[in-house]
Amino acid sequence: MAGISGTNNPCPDGFRLPTNAEFTAERNSWSSNNAAGAFASPLKLSMAGSRSSQFGSMNSLGTAGRYASSSISGTYFRATNFSSSSGSSSSTAYRSTGHSVRCIKN
């Protein structure tokens, strides 16, 4: 990833990763600020966990959703996180961490 139209953009032509601001606006539209609200949204976001940047192992499968945005700063990107027991939030993660992605149309 290197921004909205980066060379490592995982989305097909005509689509892109949302910015952190776009993900925040999406989170604010959920019926509840947690995994139930994420799954009830039109995006049907699930708790797929993430891949460790250090070890490559999968973490938080079925207990947390972590989605990458196109907003980056140095070796970090902004991510949206949620679980069934806590509200959603935005955080930073190493760009080598494997988060889920959800592409949006340009």
Image (cartoon, rainbow, N blue to C red):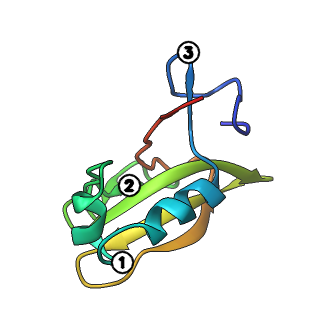
Residue 34 percent coordinates (x, y):
31, 75
Q: Which residue is mark 3?
A: 13
* Label located before the other in sequence (1 or 3): 3
Q: Of circles 2 and 1, which is in front?
A: 1
Furthest-top residue in view? 13
Q: Please name the residue shown 55% across and 65% down the image.
A: 24
Which of the two residues, 57 or 37, is positioned nearer the viewer here?
37
* Label located before the other in sequence (2 or 1): 1
Badge 3 marks a residue whose secondary structure is loop
Badge 1 marks a residue whose secondary structure is loop
The quarter of the rendered structure image containing the N terminus is top right
The three-letter amino acid code for the residue at tag 3 is Asp
Residue 94 percent coordinates (x, y):
62, 56
Q: Where 73 sits versus 7, above or below?
A: below
Badge 2 marks a residue whose secondary structure is strand
The three-letter amino acid code for the residue at tag 2 is Ser
Marks 2/1: CA distance?
20 Å
Q: Please name the residue shown 40% across and 46% down the image.
A: 100
Crowd around label 3: few <14 · some 14–19 · many ≥20 (10 Å): few
Q: Where 73 sits versus 2, above or below?
A: below
Q: Which mark is on residue 50?
A: 2
Residue 64 visible in the picture: yes
Q: Which residue is mark 1?
A: 33
Whether residue 91 sits left or right of residue 71 in the image: it is left
Residue 5 percent coordinates (x, y):
71, 29
